Amino acid sequence: MGEFINFLGNNLADFWTYTGFANATPGHLIMILVGLVFIYLAVAKEFEPMLLIPIGFGMLIGNIPFNTEAGLQVGIYEEGSVLNILYQGVTSGWYPPLIFLGIGAMTDFSALISNPKLLLIGAAAQFGIFGAYMIALALGFEPAEAGAIGIIGGADGPTAIFLSSKLAPHLMGAIAVSAYSYMALVPVIQPPIMRLLTTKKERLMRMPTPRKVSHTEKVIFPIVGLLLTTFLVPSGLPLLGMLFFGNLLKESGVTRRLAETARGPLIDTITILLGVTVGASTQASEFLTLDSVLIFGLGALSFIIATTSGVLFVKLFNLILPKHKRINPLIGNAGVSAVPDSARISQTVGLEYDPTNYLLMHAMGPNVAGVIGSAVAAGILLGFLM
């Protein structure tokens, strides 16, 4: 009987060493708390729930403690585990182009086509990327790391993941979570900057109604857009190619089933896989470092620089535009590519000062230009940092 009790006691003791309770560290608990905060923001505040719920739950999955010496092969960083195989879509960089395919299939470029000068606002907002890149260099990051960190300023999660997977895979978790966090916080970060940098008179400015864009123009745009951008920046081909291909599927009018698949089941599936695996990659041992803290700080700074650059560029641009063609500076924030949230913020802030001044259609121009701009910026960084 004594031997049986000893045997049972040894088995229970061995079992205990496998449990999460025995292997938990303060870091695991901190990251689980962060994951719960993400889920809370998504459910209670409706901050980007399509992104924050998968990422937040992925953080819970990635920070369940286990005995790493037991050979369980359940962690995301253990070669051959299920999570590791799913994570290869992130590390190999093939989730982001598929996301861009879906974005292209759901994007209407009419506002940009009808008023091409709005493209300049999207380009100006990308200064946040290069501003953060220079600051990261000054803080001691390697050039490739600084480039991957700077892309957070483009406010484009898939682009940030794609570039960091190429330039700084070891920082990808922090960069991805930072990019998606600030995308979700667009309604919190941007309005104060917009109010600070504009006068009441500028906020009340009305813009002429955009002209109607023909079907032919909509079909030609993705073809011309692909050729111009990728001849200029061939390294951006994976993202830009899929973006414009998805848009052609939408605008051609003869591939509706393909367009519906790209902007529906396909993008939803990839969003789930990308969100969960990126969240799971924030394993406490890999994520809770000084570099991660710096990346979050630089991410916020790059986002602020991008928003500021877009608004100030419009104010300067208006100095040379005829009075009847001037642009409301409130749409300058939409140059960051957080589609369509930053465009909605332009609309929301504008309506606060004039309930009849609808800026959404105008703001969509720089907003979709920002998507193109962030992909071009990623291609530029990839071109001279690889």
Image (cartoon, grey):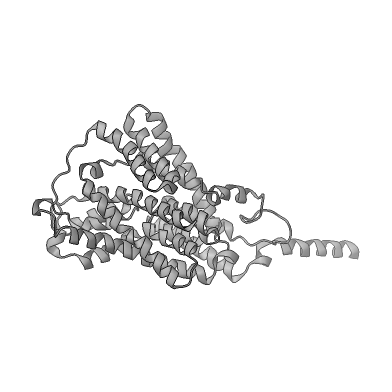
- Outermost residue, top direction? 254
Q: Residue at x 46, y 70 (%)?
A: 294
Q: Residue at x 42, y 51 (%)?
A: 379
What residue is drawn where x is 45% and y is 53%? 383
> Disc count in the image?
0
x and y percentages locating residue 128 in the rendered image = 34, 62
Which quadrant of the view contains residue 127? Answer: bottom left
- In the picture, the quarter occupied by the N terminus is bottom right
Left or right of residue 30, residue 200 in this image: left
Which residue is painted at 12% across and 62% down in the image? 201
Task: Evaluate whether residue 45 shows in this view.
Answer: no
Residue 36 in percent (x, y) is at: 49, 61
Hey, which residue is sitting farthest left in the picture? Answer: 323
Left/right placement of residue 96 relative to residue 214 reads right
70 vs 14, nearest the viewer: 70
Residue 248 versus residue 317: which sits nearer the camera? Answer: 317
Which corner quadrant of the image does residue 135 belong to? bottom left
Image position, residue 305 (x, y; %): 32, 65
Height in image: 326 above or below 138? above
Along the horizontal axis of the image, is 214 left or right of 228? left
**x and y percentages locating residue 80 in the rendered image:** 67, 49
| Residue 49, above or below 201 | above
Q: Nearer the viewer, residue 226 or 189?
A: 226
Any part of residue 28 in sight: yes
Looking at the image, residue 362 sits to the left or right of residue 62; the answer is: left
Toward which corner of the image does residue 217 lie, by quadrant?
top left
